[in-house]
Image: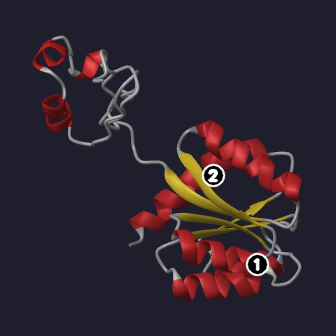
Amino acid sequence: MAPSQFVFSPGGYGSVESQLVVTRDPIRWLSLMSAHAAAQVDVSPQRCPEAPPVNRKTPTPVRAVVVDDVDDMRQLLRLLLERDGHFTVVAEADNGQSGVTAVLAHRPDLVLLDVTMPVMDGLRALKLIRSQVPSAVVVMLSSWDTSSREARTCTALGAHGYLRKDEYLHEVPDELRAILHAAHRSH
């Protein structure tokens, strides 16, 4: 028995009855329907509630990997970045070694990398990330002051920026945008 009613969706999912028609080609999908059912289906974009609105002016989010051994810090950074709307966190890691693995797997635009971590510290991870994914902008995070010897070492090893983990964490998205802008201007 042929289905009596079809629902069109952008992904190509088919019927509400016993038979399921799956195709990504709406023309083929319509050809499978009876002439009567096809005449009653409106496939215009405004009639497809599943189709997200397209805004060509919305920039592609910056893909980020967050590497920090403190779970609460990773969660806070993810929340700050994703709530901002300019960033999307594609992976998290709790030490430098798993951070390098995540960066190699995801090839992000941005890496937030804690300096002091177990297994592999941020300085060793920084060297590997910069050599293997040179297109990634790497920003170091630490509780050390931005004028410290550690901050200068990070910059000397190729970090694009150094941010202090302090009470001004809410400013991180703006600071990251400035670092990204400067990094892209220098290329």
Per the image, label 2 sits on a secondary structure element best described as helix
Relative image position of residue 99 (x, y in whole percent): 70, 74
- Asked whether, in this view, residue 58 is left or right of residue 177, the answer is left
Q: Which residue is mark 2?
A: 175
Task: Please identify the quarter of the rendering in which residue 153 is found.
Answer: bottom right
Of callouts 1 and 2, which one flags the residue occurring earlier in the amino acid sequence?
A: 1
Residue lying at 76% horizontally and 75% vertically, measured from the top left: 151
Q: Residue at x 57, y 63 (%)?
A: 110
Position of 158 relative to 7 (above/below): below
**x and y, in percent, of residue 7 in the image:** 33, 21
On the rendered structure, is 43 left or right of 147? Answer: left
Q: Residues within 10 Å of mark 2 (few under 14, many from 20)?
A: some
Mark 2 residue type: Glu
Residue 53: assigned label: none
* Left or right of 24 on screen, residue 88: right
Q: Position of residue 114 (x, y in %)?
A: 78, 69
Which residue is located at x 76 percent, y 78 percent?
Answer: 96
Kindly identify the amino acid type of the residue bearing the numbered disc 1.
Gly
Quadrant occupied by the C terminus: bottom left
In the depicted structure, whether residue 122 falls above or below residue 142: below
Report, in whole angstroms, how far the alpha carbon at label 1 lies from the one at label 2.
23 Å
Q: Secondary structure at mark 1?
A: helix
Could you say which quadrant of the image residue 186 lies in? bottom left
- The residue carrying mark 1 is 96
